[in-house]
Image: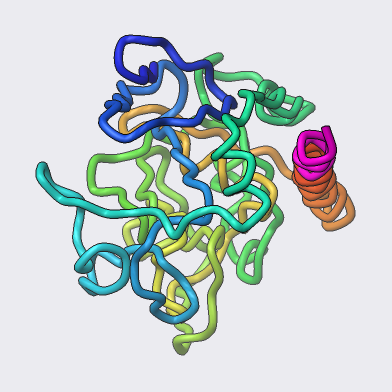
Amino acid sequence: MATLDERSILPWWTVQAKKGQVLRLGSPAVGARCYLALAGGVDTPMVLGSRSTQLRGEFGGFQGRNLRKGDVIGAIGPHAAQAKLSDAGMPEFGVEPPNFFLTSPSPVPPGDAEATVVRVLPAGEYDCYEAASLEAFWREDWKVTPDSDRYGYRLAGPTLNSRSAIEKRSHGIVPGVIQVPHRGQPIIQLRDAQPSGGYPKIGTVIEADLWRIGQTRIGSRLRFVKTSYEDALSALAENERYLDKVANLVALYRSSLLTT
């Protein structure tokens, strides 16, 4: 729930705020996080090509930390065309959320109806695990534990046992990789994860579904469904088509306003 002064703001909607108005963002009714987009972006220093915050390393963003009451940050500001529209009082508009945002991947395996479903590719050490553990990996729901963060989501569920001890040197990993430490409870590496690790890899959440992980609340459940490399590429292309469509529609909308 978002309000500008006392007026409710629809999700997926853009409005023009004036100096002195107060925007309030409540807890999201669905998912774990809400997002605020500012014209031009947030005016914080660029670090490693990004304006985001790395909390554990305490760098980037606003002084490398969470925002606190009383902090003041600004927007970089709109480009020239956007500024012209703002001066004239730009009409409001919004977009429809994509179908993949509203529905779970198909087919959905049986389990907790409230579980977040994500598509997974088997990874390097997948075949090193016992058949019963692999069956449980796909069949069971996994609880997101309280010690989860942007580094990784630690999951609780059936113990995943390898057929024999797996010893590996540290090697490169990417967001989405599902590693299994010695205690047999998986960890999904996320955006702030280290670039390398030595735990065995049982699977990888496809890139197109990483946002689903980010919107899964602590204490709720995840479910894995096996997919193929071809389907993973197709899902990513679907995401990109939606973003391209929105970008084109916004450009056409701005162009029409500038020519009227």
Colour convention: rainbow
Q: For the N terminus, which image quadrant?
A: top left
Dominant secondary structure of the residues highlighted in magenta in the image: helix
Q: What x and y, as percent, mark residue 234?
A: 87, 49
Q: Is residue 38 magenta?
A: no
Q: Is residue 254 magenta?
A: yes
Q: Is residue 169 visible?
A: yes
Magenta residues span 251-260
| Residue 100 quadrant | top right
Depth check: give the residue in front, 172 or 170.
Answer: 172
Numbered-mark total: 0
Q: What x and y, as percent, mark residue 190?
A: 46, 58
Q: Residue at x 44, y 61 (%)?
A: 180
Q: Residue at x 57, y 48 (%)?
A: 83
Q: Is residue 227 visible?
A: no
- Could you tell whether 240 is left or right of 59 in the image? right
